[in-house]
Image (spheres, helix red, strand yellow):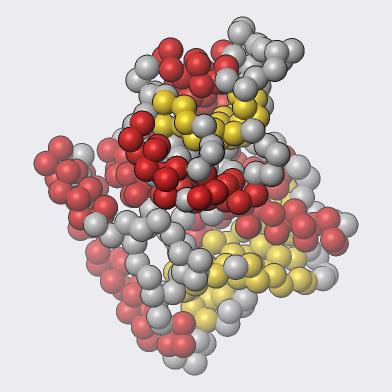
């Protein structure tokens, strides 16, 4: 193992994949708040790195590191140059392992912003035993973080593990998603069995949470009335990722009871006023549409594995991608133990 624990490295951290949607947001944050931290911007395209640095005065003096997941020597050099690699380069199932391997080989700590539960399970199984000098952490800054943080905070405030929590997202009217997320979803369609095995394995790595998480994944797809917002809700499309993550972190750290229940829901964009208990016609119409559309959706999931269809779907979805918005959504979360309730609203 090429650990450099006792050697001074040039950088405290390197941000890899900084020219993508997530990477640019992290770079802008580090540029404003890094303080005395020594850090560098890293990616495979030198021109894009230079353009990013030129676009923000706060990044003007940040060093650049050219590194490509297809070039093992550049990965090794990047890992040896810092104490921590923050990886924002996805899809991780395609691009992530080279970064993890380099960090493990050189005793470098690793953090990513992935939501690919199946890939995280694979990396944990493959590298956890070898990472004696490295800390490997995933899901940093991901959608599940507000839910995880709130479950932790409420449990600490009450002094008891939680019995249940409900997260309801109101995405507003802005459509689309980050390009990395779009590519990840297309990748899951391409190998659904790998995704299913990975989700199952990830929950199995936790402390007895597999049964509870599987139960909540089943309930996730069913119609539901939210007592948090007093309206009908639909499954939050990110729930398949967030439900197992929240269960595992809560169970592993003792923040939740063994039978903890977690619901991850969303309000139909622009339809919250129509989805109250007194007027839920739109909700029932949407549920009926889901049942009718499911066969067509399954056929599409098979067709998208064909290269021409996959390329067409990618072009269509990437046309709707965006880098994020400060005003796009709210998360409303209600958590409780046996007797007491606390409601939190998170921007």
Rendered view: 47 above or below 149: above
Q: What residue sits 59% from the left and 34% below the top?
A: 39
Hey, which residue is sitting farthest left in the picture?
308
Q: Residue furthest bottom?
A: 278
Q: Decide if residue 94 is on the left or right side of residue 225.
A: left
Q: Residue 109: x percent and y percent?
A: 63, 26
**In front here: 92 or 305?**
92
- Of the 4 image quadrants, the one containing the N terminus is top right
Please indicate whether residue 159 sits to the left or right of residue 300 in the image. right
Q: Residue furthest top?
A: 1
Q: Residue at x 25, y 67 (%)?
A: 292
User: Looking at the rendering, in which quadrant would you find the C terminus?
Assistant: bottom right
- Compared with 225, 151 (above or below) is above
Q: Is residue 331 above or below residue 36?
A: below
Asked whether the viewer can see residue 134, the reply is: yes
Camera-side residue of 170 and 193 = 170
- Percent x, y for residue 123? 52, 26
Which residue is more in the foreground, 160 or 3? 3
x then y, percent, for residue 67: 42, 24
Total labels: the figure holds: 0
Q: Residue at x 52, y 32 (%)?
A: 63
Where 192 falls versus 155 (above or below)? Answer: above
Residue 223 visible here: no
Q: Quadrant of residue 4?
A: top right
In this rendering, would 90 be left or right of 100? left
On the picture, is 144 further left or further right than 157? left
Give the quadrant of residue 47: top left
How far across and down, in percent of the image, does residue 87 sit?
50, 35
In percent of the image, x 49 and y 71: which residue is there? 327
């Amino acid at each position: 193992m090429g650990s450099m624990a006792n050697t001074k490295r040039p950088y405290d951290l390197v941000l890899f994949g900084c020219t993508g949607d997530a990477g640019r947001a992290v770079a802008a944050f580090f540029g404003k708040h890094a303080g005395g931290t020594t850090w560098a911007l890293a990616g495979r395209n030198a021109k894009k790195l230079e353009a990013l640095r030129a676009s923000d005065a706060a990044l003007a003096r940040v060093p650049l590191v050219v590194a490509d997941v297809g070039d093992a020597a550049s990965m090794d050099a990047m890992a040896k140059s810092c104490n921590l690699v923050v990886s924002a380069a996805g899809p991780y199932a395609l691009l992530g392992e080279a970064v993890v391997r380099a960090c493990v080989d050189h005793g470098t700590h690793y953090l990513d912003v992935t939501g690919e539960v199946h890939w995280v399970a694979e990396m944990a199984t493959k590298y956890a035993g070898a990472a004696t000098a490295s800390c490997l952490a995933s899901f940093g800054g991901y959608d599940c973080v507000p839910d995880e943080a709130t479950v932790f905070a409420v449990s600490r405030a009450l002094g008891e593990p939680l019995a249940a929590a409900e997260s309801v997202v109101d995405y507003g009217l802005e459509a689309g998603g980050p390009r990395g997320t779009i590519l990840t979803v297309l990748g899951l369609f391409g190998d659904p069995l790998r995704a299913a095995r990975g989700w199952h394995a990830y929950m199995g790595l936790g402390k007895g949470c597999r049964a509870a998480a599987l139960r909540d994944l089943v309930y996730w797809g069913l119609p539901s009335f939210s007592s948090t917002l007093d309206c009908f809700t639909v499954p939050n499309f990110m729930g398949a990722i967030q439900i197992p993550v929240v269960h595992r972190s809560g169970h592993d750290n003792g923040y939740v009871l063994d039978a903890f229940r977690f619901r991850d829901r969303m309000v139909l964009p622009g339809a919250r006023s129509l989805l109250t208990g007194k007027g839920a016609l739109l909700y029932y119409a949407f549920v009926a549409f889901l049942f009718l559309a499911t066969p067509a959706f399954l056929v599409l999931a098979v067709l998208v594995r064909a290269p021409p269809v996959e390329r067409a779907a990618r072009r269509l979805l990437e046309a709707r991608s965006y880098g994020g918005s400060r005003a796009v959504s709210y998360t409303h979360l209600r958590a409780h133990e046996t007797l007491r309730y606390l409601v939190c609203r998170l921007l």
